[in-house]
Image (spheres, rainbow, N blue to C red):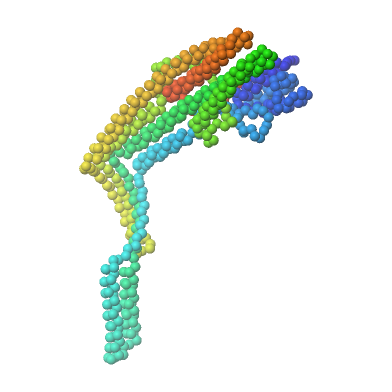
Amino acid sequence: MIVIDRKNIVGLFFKSTCILLALGLPLISVAQDVALEISKSGIETDPETVDIETIADVSEKFSDDLVSVSEKITVDTLEISAVPVSLGKSDDNIPEAFHVLDLVGAQRRAVIDNPSIAAGAERVKQVQQVVKQARSMYYPQIDMSYSYSLSWLPSGYTDSVNSYLNETEDVLRDWRKESIFQSTITRQPSLRERRDARRWYGSTRDFIDETRESIESPVDNTSVSITLGWLLFDGFAREFTNAMAKHGYEEAQAAFREGQRILLDAVSQAYYGAQMAREQVTIATSDVAFYERLHKEAQARREVGRGATSHVLSFQTLWYAARTSLLLAERNYETARIILAMLLGMPEGRLDSRFDLAALEEETPETMILPDEGAMLALAFALRPDLEQRELGLRRTQAAVKREYAGFAPQIAAVGQVQTANVNESGFDSERITTTVALNASLNIFSGGRRRAQVIEAKHARREAELRIVESEQEITSDVYQAMTNLKVAQEALALQREAAGCIEKNRNLVELEYNAGKAMLVGLSQAQREYTQAMGVLAQARVGLQQTWQALHAATGTNLDVLNQEKDEVSAKVITECCETIEE
């Protein structure tokens, strides 16, 4: 039989709780199960609080339930960059989720939500369409045109024709009267002759009316044509235009990655700036608690007649000063959170109460080792996207020079056209369709020096791109050297400041003991506390500075972009494996 005592139950619950916190699982269900088992066991407890000693009285069955809960951990419930916690009593006014924001989570959130990065992505998509536009030059171009027009004859032409028609109409009318008069004198015309005369007279009048109407009405013209053109040769200008577009697209991608590198560096600096501000809040809080304790002790000594009123007032003054410093530290911390929220692209414009920063990382032996300078330079030249952008810009300008030379070559194109035109016709007849096939060749003999100037301009642009590469190499070298120097100083400063802070803390404790024993003055104690507070602030600054210099070195070498290539599934699997090994142990 396996016997589980109180210590085993406490240890098992503590391990399970740590595993759930590390994996980011909500603990409200575990807390509810604890309360339920405690209520079943008959132990009287406060329903809003459950401590470890109370949990130690739970039976062996509840410890088995904890193990079963820990075995239900799955990959789908993991949150790497944001750890939700749901401790405490349920309340509708509590925020929906609480997130502990670490550096990697902040950087990933910034890359996703920052509007400048989104704008850069849109820029890359624009350049991608330029590549497709350049590629379209290899395909034949088909154009279709349709035109419909109305034309009115000039008034000078229509007036003369109308005058002629009026005269013709008058002559015709006179002729009719004369013919009728002659027929009554000479002989009576036959019925057939009268019909023919009326028919001829009517048709002539109709012709005159139609002619008058046609010259006064507009003439409609309709034409439809389909043209197929295919550029056969243009001095290889298309090839170099496509090369320029491809290099431009790759250049835009490199520029986008450079924007990400700069943003990640800015987020890391702002993140650790907020960490530094929070450390100052912690130090100021400790300072307030120290003087508050001394003030209460001085009041107690005065009440029993062993302390002076001046000491009470002095400690109260120092306590007020410490509280003022705490307010300033809290203001700086909130300002740092606002700056960080701006870089993260938070729509609220600030990190509200749902977000808290992860604890400041402890320095490891690896962080206290200075890397090789030559290796860092080689890494920067291989990974920095701004240098890649300059190199792609040089390739683009080289292709531009060759494209300008193509302007001296002839252009040859094949053209095919199908066209039909109608005048005062509503339909299209196949008999009026004309088909044309042609081969066009053109060569510019003289352009006034324009082509030569374009070639020279492209050559100067190529030379500029070459100099830009040299400039980028110098900037990268300078960035790496500065980052290495700052890292070396930060490592040495942290080691020295940690030793100094230890000495100052010991001195403060000794002075406090001497003051309590009546062997030290109040001024000495306040000075020792002031030196201790300053030393802790400098130590926090040194700790944060070490992390900032490491991040600056990562940005200088371009390795900070690796955070975007890490897969969450791999990290999640690693966490699960470690947790399972811990449970088995």
Q: Position of residue 106 (x, y in %)?
A: 52, 28
The relative height of residue 504 versus residue 261 in the rendered view (above or below) is above
Q: Position of residue 280 (x, y in %)?
A: 54, 22
As drawn, the residue found furthest toward the right would be 42
Give the side of residue 335 with respect to residue 120, left or right. Answer: right
Q: Position of residue 561 (x, y in %)?
A: 46, 26
Name the residue located 69 percent from the left edge and 23 percent from the top edge: 66
Q: Nearer the viewer, residue 2 or 158?
A: 158
Name the residue located 38 percent from the left edge and 62 percent from the top edge: 427
Name the residue located 32 percent from the left edge and 39 percent from the top edge: 238
Give the side of residue 381 with respect to residue 234, left or right. Answer: right
Q: Nearer the viewer, residue 504 or 350?
A: 504
Give the side of residue 237 with respect to residue 504, left or right. Answer: left
Q: Nearer the viewer, residue 551 or 322?
A: 322
Give the side of residue 478 with respect to residue 293, left or right. Answer: left
Count of residue discs: 0
Name the residue located 76 percent from the left edge and 24 percent from the top edge: 44
Q: Could you say which quadrant of the image residue 132 lies in?
A: top left
Q: Could you say which quadrant of the image residue 413 lies in?
A: top left
Q: Could you say which quadrant of the image residue 426 lies in?
A: bottom left
The relative height of residue 474 versus residue 442 in the rendered view (above or below) is above
Q: Is residue 579 visible?
A: yes
Q: Quadrant of the N terminus?
A: top right
Q: Position of residue 439 (x, y in %)?
A: 27, 47
Q: Is residue 315 visible?
A: no
Q: Quadrant of the C terminus?
A: top right
